[in-house]
Image (tube, coloured by chain):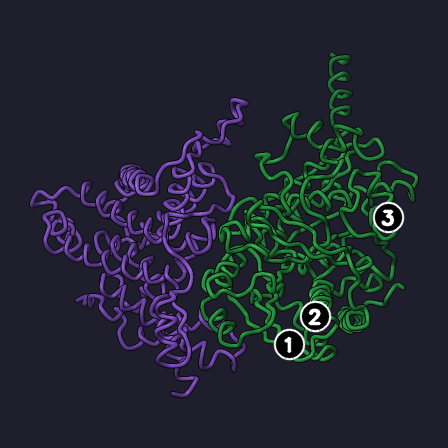
Chain colours: A green, B purple
Amino acid sequence: MKTKLATMALGAVMAAGPVMADLVFPSLSYRTGPYAAGGIPFADGYADYFTLLNERDGGIGGVPAKVIECETGYNTEKGVECYESTKGEGALVYQPLSTGITYQLIPKTTADGIPMHTMGYGRTSAKNGGVFSHTFNYPANYWDGASGAINYLLEENGGDLNGKKVALVYHNSAYGKEPIRTLEELSKKHGFELVALPVDHPGQEQKSQWLQIRRDKPDYVLMWGWGVMNQVAVQEAANIRFPMENFIGIWWSGSENDVLPAGEAANGYKALTFHNVGSDFPLYDDLNKYVIDAGKAAGAGDQVGTVLYNRGLYAAMLAAEAAKKAQEISGNAEITPADMRDGMEALEITEAKMSELGLPNFGPTFSVSCENHGGDALVGVTQWDAATKTWSLISEFKPTDGDVIGPLITEDSSAYAAENNIDPRC
Amino acid sequence: MPEQLVFGMEVILNGLMAGVLYALVALGFVLIYKASGIFNYAQGVMALFAAMTLVGIMNGQVPFSHLINAIFGTHIHYFGWNVPALFAILLTMAVMVLLAWAVQRFVMRHLVGQEPIILFMATIGLAYFLEGVADLMWGSEIKTLDVGLPQGINLWIDESTFNIFGYGFFIDNLDIVATVIAALLVAALVAFSQYTKQGRAMRAVADDHQAALSVGISLNFIWIMVWSVAGFVALVAGIMWGTKSGVQFSLSLIALKALPVLMLGGFTSIPGAIVGGLIIGVGEKLFEFTLGPALGGATENWFAYVLALIFLVFRPQGLFGEKIIERV
């Protein structure tokens, strides 16, 4: 009897052992609700990359990666519940995929000592790692997006936007309002007129905004939208025959979902990006072999190669590389959230590393430091081809205007530090 | 003519068109409330379900394919055929009738005589159930809906108004089609309820379902019929809104646009839904045009409710609603 009990206990310990040792990457996903069409591909890409590492490499540094998925429905309260219910599982890094959830989790993750990565969303001034010790937003943030769009327009206009009119159609939320301050500063610097046009959630009805655009005749329209707002805006732009090549969305307004419903009319629409598009990368050979063809793809397996799938894949790759860095720094394969934070803060993404990972020219090169949690702020532009139903990267990843963005980040992060009695670390 | 006045006329016309689209959603609520006293929270989801079913049938999508593939390890997603739009609409209508029967058989039949709030709660449950079934049946991705409706600026109106005012008005062809369809729909519904045996039976049930039962009217049949008609209205609304934005889960949120229309027009009047929709449509667009810029824009959502509340102060039953007198 004693032998049996001892065997059972040993078995239980052995069974529990690997679970404890797994590197846990929670995925706060949204596969249901109005924003599911955007949440599903990201969650699939995020999960598939870790599946690939487990199947091909046996995990990260020999330790299996474990993705715990929790459904937020893009709802801030549910997102916080997901955080509370998963943080005890040994979570190494959170990627909430929602600016609302990010704002709620900044103080919580800081207090709990768990890093959070908000790639291309969240609180922009979290780039100041001296104040936001556990929040990272590399490789680019909303203000980089605003500056990237204006830089692109400058290029298109021979470096002169003086006298031009730029309209911003934005989701009337904290997310949508993020670029306004930067664009106001940029309009002063470059002499263009900025017209801000808010669209209420969810954005199914935008007739007033597009009638105004038709009357005012701006030279360019920028869009900060998400979900149904994007599809309606592209359709309305087509309806008033606004030239699509002069219509540029932020990266959350630049997926297949946003342009397909408008059909041919969406041809030429542009969007900003901080990663490449399509599936023509060596990594996809391994993904097909170890994950997709093996029947281990997340979800229905039908999102592979889409813009948002690539973004999820990229987010997972950056998390995995930070985990490797953390293992290297700590000397332990089984890292803690504190190690992970150190790994993220020492992360360096070079083109050589990207090529080695099977993702040449997939994303910008950047490095992270205590002072700079936002990377090198390089932004590219993509364009939609309705005939082939594909996005193409039409510019390199180019620098944004640090002279304008830098002081804004200092101002906002200093205010946060003062409100929360934070002494900058660096 | 002053430029702002011309712009204002264009805004009013577009407000009227938007109002028709709101009214299309509100009509479904009115039909069910009129016949059974139930505020059907699931009406928006019914529009979503109908539109998803229509696209699925048109594209030859295998329903529940993800579930089937997960259980049996197969990789089937499409039958390999496309169904013409008109035939697909008929098939979708058959699905909506089946849904009406299921709602009646498995939900409402068991709740006859219950408090209105319980019936309302049941429709909340129905909304969540239906949303889940739609997801499982057809998937969550955004689908393009093209039943051949024209979209984009109406060039004739653009040119005609340009010749008169020196500024061409923008009117979306889809909105014009929606207006014509809504007008036909309302005329058909009014004629149905006034001049057909089933329509009169429906009104009798709405007045007093026990009295109707005593004269031999089948409650089951009437309620299935009403839910079917509401399903048809949901399908029309789903086609119009789905053509604009693609068929996706946020389509169910169009119900939010119907609430101020119902508050204003009354829950029991079909013409009220139309007039309410037009007032809300024009009111919110004009407010946004005139005072929106001074208030930071995006006033339409909240202004629609404010407008409805102002009407409620003076006519709690809505413009065309029945005045309820309760004697104690």
**Mark 1–mark 2 CB contact (< 8 Å):** yes
Judge from the rendering whether residue B138 lies leftward or rightward of residue A76; answer left or right: left
Q: Are marks 2 and 3 on the same chain?
A: yes
Q: Which residue is mark 1?
A: A164
Q: Which residue is mark 3?
A: A350
Q: Residues within 10 Å of mark 1 (few under 14, many from 20)?
A: some
Dividing the picture into quadrants, the one containing residue A86 is top right
Chain for numbered disc 1: A
In three-dimensional space, the C-alpha distance between marks 2 and 3, rounded to whole angstroms, equals: 31 Å
Mark 1 or mark 2: whose residue is earlier in sequence: 2
| In this view, the mark in front (1 or 2) | 2
List x then y, in percent, for residue B226: 23, 48
Q: Residues within 10 Å of mark 2 (few under 14, many from 20)?
A: few
Element assignment for label 1? loop
**Quadrant into which the C terminus of chain A falls:** bottom right
Q: Is residue B98 above or below residue A217?
A: above
| In this view, the mark in front (2 or 3) | 2
Which label sits on residue B80?
none
List x then y, in percent, for residue A266: 53, 55
Q: Which residue is mark 2?
A: A157
Could you tell me if residue B22 is visible in this image?
no
**Quadrant into which the N terminus of chain A falls:** top right
Element assignment for label 3? loop
